[in-house]
Amino acid sequence: MMKVFTAWFTMLLLSFLLLPVIGLAAAQPIQLFMNGKQLVPEVAPRIVNDNTIVPIRIIAESLGSKVSWDPKLRKVSVAKEGTSIQLFIDKKQATVDGKSYTLETAPTIIEGNTMLPIRFVSENLGVEVTWDEPTRSVFLYHKQKESPEPDQTGSEDGKVKEEQGKPGNDAAAAGNNSAGNNNSAGGKNPQESKDKTGDKEASSGGSGNPVKAGEQPVNPGANAPSPGCAVPQSATRSLAPGAADANAPAVKDGKAPVKVQSITFDGEMLCIQTTGGEVKPTMFKLAEPDRIVLDIPGAELDATLATVVNEAKEGTVPLTEPHDIVAKIRYSLFSKEPSTVRIVIDLQKKSELILSDVLPGGLISAKLAKGKDRYRVVIDPGHGGKDSGAVSVTNRFEKDLVLSLGHKVADLLQKEPGIEAVMTRSDDTFIELADRVAKAEESEADLFISIHANTINKESVGGTETFYWTPQSMDFANLMHKSIVEATGFTDRKVKQERFYVIRNTTMPSVLLEIGFLSNPAEEALMYQDAFQNRVAESIVAAIKKQLNLD
């Protein structure tokens, strides 16, 4: 009886010990945003005592602060615009301009990187911090200081930087308090997201001449609509000479806030009519679920929109008909200080929003870019020629294995009507890393997959791992890794972020795959078999199709 009780108690104890590990493994990575741009730290952020700690580099680069290190005292100093913060590794004592504070979580060193509590440092440098639990994201908002007005001597240092709206979670736009000043972000968390829409040509506002983002349209009319956008009657009303406009926005601090008068969506065009003025919308994306967020800093909702919001202070934009990409469009006054109108497009599948220049009449237009009819995917078998890559336990070369597997992937892709496969090398040729990247860029590829095999000086080590670098590649890497791990049956060595040249310098979603270990006899024997390679090739293609929404 005692043996039975002891065994039962041991199992119960083990179950409690394993619960945190299981929870940690399933936890979604913490994401970090600064003014709407996603940041990627060198080491993944960690939550310690309900506080997020991040590498010091992120704090220094994203906040524009100066960081110094005293190895003797193990002290980190962060300085910015007259504020000086001093923290000590593994100690909870910190000072701000000489005043002492006790931290909930002490700074630490992880994998050679100094990790600091982001909330404490950010807020003491004048940066607002909010936490979004559903997406496990930390949103930082750094308000630029206004410079003094130019003096009469002609000084040019009086320009005022445009204040931007506070990026955050779209749940807050719906009045959800989960995105508020939650302590779980306390001191809590991916390189900047490159928004491809910024490189595309925007509408000229009806002039017939395309203009690039940041340029002014050629001779647009005062209220000339972008193609596909109709100017609402409220935006074109005229007044008798000398008459006062009852609907004009109230002047605040010498500057009238912009009013958002109407928001419409028809097919592929999102049209936002404002009262004009200095309007500089910002845009970013969120995932799980996929959303595009458009912020209009310095704007308020006109009464026509503000009076039809729900109890959560959120309004919806009617869709003229069911849409295959857009599930819902909603808007709200996301922030009052600074005043910011937020528009969130809930997506049924991944898409792009191409934002045009704001016309002088205050019209903001954006075009939803639907998926392509045909995609281009670059397959990059690593090494080749004089570069053999890893040498297996039976003296076979990595370059031959990955070329064979690369051909199998490309052959399967060519059978897909919506995909064109491009190989960086199709024979035993040495290709420079820069040339591999150049081929992907010149091909205007939609995806890039570099195929490799691993090695280590220990035969017992094995497994499959997937690498990415840019934030736009993270979802693709997770999707790809899950697929190939199921195909190989090898140990799951997880998805990792590394600065490998080909995935760091390509502008499309890119991954580098390490299928298995050539130094592991069991894995090596399998990897050179056609049946194994066919199975892995099918798994790679399945992930590609899913990423492109072709499955």
Image (cartoon, rainbow, N blue to C red):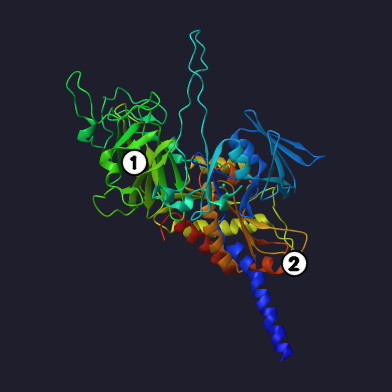
The quadrant in which the N terminus is found is bottom right
Label 1 close to label 2 by CB (< 8 Å): no
Q: Is residue 86 left or right of residue 211?
A: right
Most extreme residue toward the right, as rendered?
72
The kind of secondary structure element at disc 1 is strand
**Could you say where residue 433 lies in the image, as x and y percent from the top left?**
62, 43
**Could you say where residue 299 lies in the image, as x and y percent from the top left?**
37, 35
Q: Nearer the viewer, residue 92 or 64?
A: 92
The quadrant in which the C terminus is found is bottom left
Q: Is residue 431 visible?
A: no
The residue beneath circle 2 is: 460
Question: Residue flagged by tag 1: what amino acid is it?
Answer: Lys
Give the mark count. 2
Q: What's the residue at 50%, 18% (across, down)?
A: 158
**Could you say where residue 348 lies in the image, as x and y percent from the top left?**
37, 55
The crowd level at tag 2 (other Cα within 10 Å; few <14, some 14-19, many 20+) is few
The residue beneath circle 1 is: 367
The crowd level at tag 1 (other Cα within 10 Å; few <14, some 14-19, many 20+) is many
Residue 208 found in image quarter? top left
Question: Residue flagged by tag 2: what amino acid is it?
Answer: Ser
Q: Nearer the viewer, residue 540 or 409?
A: 540
**Could you say where residue 455 lies in the image, as x and y percent from the top left?**
72, 58
The kind of secondary structure element at disc 2 is loop
